[in-house]
Amino acid sequence: MMLLRRIRGLVGTALMWGVVGAAVGVGAFLIRYRPWPPSAIHWSRALVVFGMWESAAAMWGIACGLAFGLVLLASERTRHFSQLSTRRVTLWGALAGAAFPMLISIRPILSGASVMFFGMIVGASAVAGALWARGTMAIARRVPSEPDPLMILEEPAPFEHGAATAARDRVR
């Protein structure tokens, strides 16, 4: 049961980071390609580029979220959730945010690409990872660990003849 809970947490974290990555990707797409004013001739090309850009941004977020979840599981496995420090979680988020772009930038740097360009990407991703980790932690702290008894719905009464009429009369 504990393994399923951890897998569910990893999947949830990866998906949440993927959604945030896709949202950031929309802004980055609008800044980078400036698709306005819209032209009917270029719509198909713009939609293809937008789809590729968004899928890449979402995959980036999912990869960083999965890295964050794995780093958090490995490093904080002996601590209970209530014992986690926001500062440490933010640090792990920055590390996870930087890990994925560092991995994909090794080959271009070795082949002569600009170290400064990839360094800016790694730095921006690390800052985003720290912010997303802090947000993930804030959201996770708001979720109750036990279901509230008031939130559990009681079993509805069986259907009785005339119950709808009686309920309508009470409303009037």
Image (cartoon, rainbow, N blue to C red):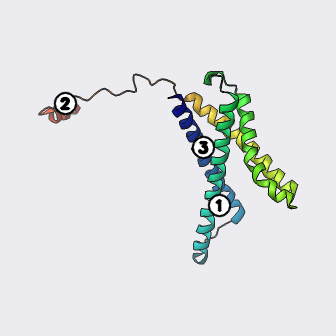
Instruction: Say which label, 3 or 1, has the lower sequence index.
Output: 3
Instruction: Say which label, 2 or 1, has the lower sequence index.
Output: 1
Instruction: Give the camera-side residue of 63 and 86.
Output: 63
Residue mark closest to the camera, 3 vs 2: 3
Q: Please state the horizontal and vertical placement of residue 25, each as a whole percent of the image.
A: 65, 55
**Residue 40 vertical position relative to residue 47 in the rendered view, above or below:** below
Residue at image mark 3: 14
Q: Are marks 3 and 2 in contact (CB under 8 Å)?
A: no
Residue at image mark 2: 158
Residue type, label 2: Pro
Q: CA distance from mark 3 to mark 1?
A: 18 Å
Residue type, label 1: Trp
Quarter-wise, where is residue 81 in the image? Answer: top right
Total marks shown come to: 3
Residue at image mark 1: 53
Q: Please state the horizontal and vertical placement of residue 171, each as a whole percent of the image.
A: 23, 32
Q: Please state the horizontal and vertical placement of residue 98, each as a whole percent of the image.
A: 76, 44
Q: Residue sitting at 83 percent across and 51 percent down?
A: 119
**Residue 47 vertical position relative to residue 89 in the rendered view, above or below:** below
Instruction: Give the camera-side residue of 35 and 69.
Output: 69
Residue type, label 3: Ala
